[in-house]
Image (cartoon, rainbow, N blue to C red):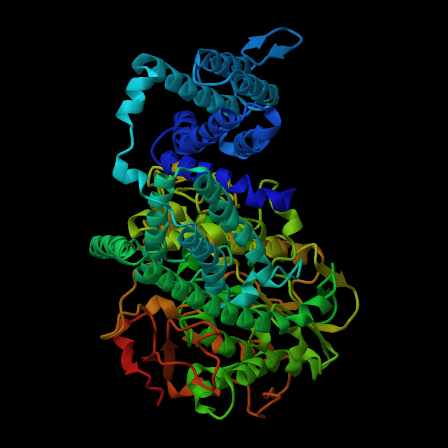
Amino acid sequence: MEYLSYFTTKPIILLMEIIFMVFGRVYDTQLVVLLVCVVMNLFLRPLFLTVDHRIKSALCINKKAIKNAPALCLSFAVHIMILFATTSFFMDVNIIKGKSLGPIANLGAGDALIDFSSFSVNVLPVVFFVISLLSVLLSKDRKRFHKAFMVVLYLCITVFLYFSTAGNALFWIAYAVFSLIEVGLKELFKQEKIKALFKENPKMKKLKGNPALFFMAVFYLIILTSLFIPTNIMKVSAAEFVDVLDVKNPLHYLFYSFAYAFGTFGIWFSVFYLISKETVRYILDRVFCIICFVAFINYVVAGSYLGETSPALFYFEFHDFGTGRILISLLLSLVVGAAILILMEKSKTFVQILIGVEIGMVLFSTVTNCIKINSVYSGLDYLDEENEYESIIHLSQNGENVVVLILDRALGTEVPYIFNEKPELKEQFDGFVYYPNTVSFGGYTNTGIPAVYGGYEYTPERINARSDESLEKKHNEALKVMPVLFAQNDFDVTVCDPVYAGYNWIPDLSIYDDYPDISAFNTDGKFNDSAPDDYVGPKELLKRNFFVHSLMKTAPLNWQLLLYNEGQYCNPNFNYSKKDDSVYQSEGYDADFLDAYLVLTSLNEITEIEEENNNNFLLFYNATPHMPNLLQEPDYVPSRIVDNREYHKDDRDKYIVDGVELPMQSAAQLTHYDVNMASYLLVGKWLDYLKENGCYDNTRIIIVADHGRNVHETEKIGESDIEMEFFFPALMVKDFNAKGFSVSEDVMTNADVVSLASTGVIPNPVNPFSGNALDGHEKESGELKVFYSEKCNLEDNHGNVFVKGKWFSVHGNPREIDNWSYLGEDSNQ
């Protein structure tokens, strides 16, 4: 039944959701419910009228019921499918539940307008039946059998509505009112006058539809929106669309997008076309042909790539289209539409050829995309071999523990302000030294993370110097430097989520297969059983959102923001829209954030503390700070509805440390701050757990990030447009038996992690793969060369050297802009 709904009722539900969310941006929920009822009825009215006309025509030809069965069945099917769709919509939309409208206490439940002490009576379904019955009885152009059929149909709907919601009953009351108005208009103007008013022009009678052309256009729209555009998205990073808890080929989402598209274009519009008059078919031919070409134009003009998206199809930086670009696209659409109309008058065959060419192009591209996606999925066969696990982190009470915790995009600039707002963190982070003058060698994970794992031999400059080796080989080598080093020195080694291992989005843990003393795990997304009860993951949403995303990309540019709806594609239950243009409010969950956040919430549960004297090394990666989100203050926890306005009335003091104020006005600034705060709060709880279980003092802990982010308006470097903050990662270190929380002004880099972890624990540590000393001597030259490129995905960097980017040099304190120099693009010498 679920699969069948994608072909039948879900397209109707989707339309209702879009209408609900578009009006919901302006009006209160109660008014939006009424608007949905009215607008949807106006939209569906031509379908109802056409079906009714077919029944009348059938009855005129033959009065025997058996001969009229097809028309009657069609009417029954259309009404019942729409009834199921409206019922599902009004039952599932959470925001409607509990909302009152006049005497109706709850639009999401039965109206219960007559309430006795022991039971209540729903009145609205009865109102629907009375109005519907009145429209049938007053209608003089229906045969007796037709009237009897409609009464039975309305009676069935009434019984169904009685056990449904008040919102659903209002929709069908609107339907009944429209039916009654139509009957009244007919009686007012008399049949003859209406027929004369709408009498077809003799020339119009000659207009004929072209079913072959129409269904070619329908087929094209189906494959464009359900196959071509979704596979264009998947091919960029196919592995991101694989659920690590339920490993399936990402191509399985195409079934759902295809079902949505086929139900929308292949069933609903096609049924309407087939039962319509020839003049209507003639119009629909032209409308759908124009849509075919304009949709492609919109997709090309908008660009198939608008920025980096999450696996939930959320653009990290979705930019509004400029007025000029919108006007150009509209003008181009008008020109293309006019050209298609002219061509159809001259030669329908030529238009059919053009649509055929479009079909061939998108089919070919779809096939090649599918081959690429399937190839990536085939390389993820290692995921099936990963076992379930509970205890991942092993620490000793009596041996030495070394922990390296990598927090992706943890901003070094925010640490003082986070600890200022939450002073208890200084107690939890007892013994830590914070290094504010820390530099990253790359502005993004792809280029910044290798040096964190492997040290100075894996900066972008040094990686590019080994131009005869693949980036994958060098990256995997960096991931193995510390684990192999510590394993060779009698440490029990655990690695969690080694970034891009095997040069895959989902880490390929097999890179450690040659080292039996190394235990490796992927944790991201594997603790979602502790997610909030009202959370629905992206893998479920993608069944719907791939198709809506395609509709968005093919719509006129001025409509695309409405359909995008802040990344939730007009889903009323999981929208991520800001209310009242407030940067302090949001709705909905970010699936990527929860995948990482829930790992940190589970740290205590997955940590096993032992009494043995063995030594342990833990290399743990987590991306919670990388996923900017508004969290509910003051505890900074995820919530479907976040409203922090009360906490930001007089909040300047907490953003001022040593007389320096941290800019906190934009959404980017607030969301980055929130996820960074949440990360430290959760790590702090884990540190308390270590103290309570007697393995804190004997543990060296390094907290580090791979890069920063330009959210707090630092100065731009030289003649470039790149801000310093891209290269300011967090770095905090607690040594064995250290006490107090302090700040060091030493100039550091995140490539110092290897030497910080091994010094004093491993005598004369060297890189197991090169034999070079891991003591950070490379920093003695005083010059640090860092790299920035927005081509930061594995799909962009899969050769031997990083693609072209901008290079910078920094001497001394990196917080001083005068110590930076811009070296230009693609200069790594």
Total labels: the figure holds 0
Give 807 or 568, whichever is nearer the viewer.
568
- Residue plotted at (58% across, 62% down): 250
Residue 539 seen in the figure? yes
Give 449 or 397, whichever is nearer the viewer.
449
Looking at the image, is 203 positioned above or below residue 463? above
Looking at the image, is 102 positioned above or below residue 213? above
Residue 99 seen in the figure? no
The quarter holding residue 417 reads bottom left
Q: Return the x and y of residue 636 as percentages of the image width and height.
A: 50, 46
Q: Is residue 693 left or right of residue 379?
A: right
Give 374 or 388, whichever is nearer the viewer.
374
Image quarter where the N terminus lies is top right
Image quarter where the C terminus lies is bottom left
Q: Is residue 412 left or right of residue 250?
A: left
Q: Return the x and y of residue 603 as percentages of the image width and height.
A: 65, 57
Looking at the image, is 803 positioned above or below residue 580? below
Give 652 or 513, whichever is nearer the viewer.
513
- Residue plotted at (53% across, 27% down): 97
- Name of the residue lying farthest toward the right: 612
Q: Return the x and y of residue 418 as percentages of the image width and height.
A: 44, 53
Q: Return the x and y of residue 682 as percentages of the image width and height.
A: 57, 53
Looking at the image, is 271 positioned above or below residue 294? above
- Residue plotted at (37% across, 38% down): 22
